[in-house]
Amino acid sequence: MADEIRTRIAPSPTGYLHFGTARSALFNYLFAKQSGGMFILRVEDTDTSRNRPEYDADILDSLNWLGLAADRTFRQSEALPAHQAALRAMIEADRAYVSKEPAKDDPSRTVEVIRLRNPGTKITFTDLIRGDITFDTGELGDFVIARSMNEPLYHLAVVVDDHDAGITHVIRGEDHISNTPRQILIQEALGYARPQYAHIPLILAPDRSKMSKRKHETSLLQFRARGYLPEAMVNYLALLGWHPDDDQELFTLPELVCAFDLSRIQKGGAVFDPDKLRWFNKQYLGQKSDAEFAYEAAAVLKEALAARGVAWQQDTGERLAPLLRERVSVWEDLRAEAEAGEYDYFFAPPALDASILPGKHASAQEAAAHLSHADQLLSSLSHDDYAAEVIKEAIWPYAEEQGRGAVLWPLRYALSGRERSPDPFTIIAAIGVSDARARIKAAISLLVQ
RNA sequence: GGCCCUAUCGUCUAAUGGUUAGGACAUCGCCCUCUCACGGCGGUAAUCCGGGUUCGACUCCCGGUAGGGUCACCA
């Protein structure tokens, strides 16, 4: 298919996959897929001094995790013969030449590098996002395209590989704009057709500088480990620099494929906003089935509680997990809260502070009386395992009559030992009636002593 | 510094000559409520500056200013 659209992403395995690269991958994927084209991954592994196998694996893992698996995968190092052939052709045609010059690291030694014979023309290319961009290539000089016949450099390798793979559209970060004229010069020396270019804006740090691995969290792996969902990542990244023609914000990957439009990509850089990512993550967490959510929440809780030595009870855990639905945006939040002891009281009686126990609406005496009455009401429930609604029905009329604050605060505090927590009925449903009554009795004795 | 790119609420953005400049996140307030969370309702908040062009500029042109990118025998 001569007019099939082919795009590519070309990361180098010198670090964990950066989410800027992930967004480039997403845009390339969307653009190719919406016309039934091909999305190609080329691992640029020619810098042997900086490559690491684990980074190579991480690129693949991360792309798969996002659902952006490539149709074909290449390693740039495999294309050395093609690079050499291109170099020979250029030298033969006198579009490049071997230059003997002092070595950079050791000027006393002479080396041979291969330089492009730069015609120094003005190059204008049409960027699909920014329009025509013109460079005067005379300023570039006869730049080096290979360290030797066996060591092609970036610009040469990119041009040859893109050509050989039949890449029709180069969609990449804005930081490559100034690389484009060099690559066009090489294309012209080789007699290759020019692909279409689209330079997408960069993802910026809050100070509007380029995100750096040093100062910011940029690896996709890290977001995954913190409990972000791939759907949220994809959705957020898509909207960072692109916008549909209406106000829709929630998109699945297939929906993005349909809605995506290169011409609606923003020109200016976009500041990464963790809060909005969290919001997206919450939306997708909310779409999980109850069973799936509870299973994953329980796993996070269990691990965190084990770390602080709190004995996990499976039945309580299973009743607690669904309650977390509206309280979690990202799994790491839940983990952090659990590790800080926020959920201990579901598994062990809390320590109580007698001065807080009565709350604002009741004296110590009144609170004790209310607790005692609540205990009595609970005693009418014959077994342990009731839904929160049933427990509420048992206690609510009394609370209405006596003042909700006066009854419910002491009750809730007696059960949780916390000034902030879910409502008492929910807690009782999770820990069981008999356990709840034991805590209430303990609270009463604290008040009357 | 040279070259290149960019410029709408705090942030992501909509509006491609005529809108009370719209939406989302964040934020604030109110409601719900024993507390927290969730939810509902509402508010604050923006066209970088200066010139043109035009009956009319967020929108087009020019000039400033600001920010960013890039200037390797790295990718």
Image (cartoon, rainbow, N blue to C red):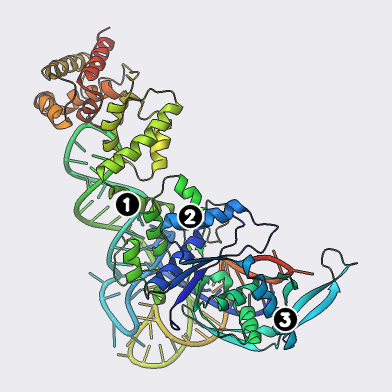
**Tag 2, which chain?**
A
Residue A213 visible at all: no
Label 2 sits on a secondary structure element that is: helix
SS at badge 1: helix
Quadrant that contains the C terminus of chain A: top left
Query: Label 2 sits on what residue type?
Result: Ser
Q: Nearer the viewer, residue A239 or A420?
A: A239
Question: For mark 3, what is the residue?
Answer: A88
Dot 3: what SS? helix
Q: Where's residue A38, x and y in %?
A: 44, 72
Q: Which residue is mark 1?
A: A284
Question: Is A289 or A238 nearer to us in this picture?
Answer: A289
Residue drawn 14% across the image and 32% down it? A389
* Comparing labels 2 and 3, the label whose residue is closer to the camera: 3
Location of residue B57 in the rendering, given as x and y in whole percent from the top left corner: 38, 81
Q: Which residue is mark 2?
A: A62
Residue type, mark 1 in image: Tyr
Q: How many marks?
A: 3
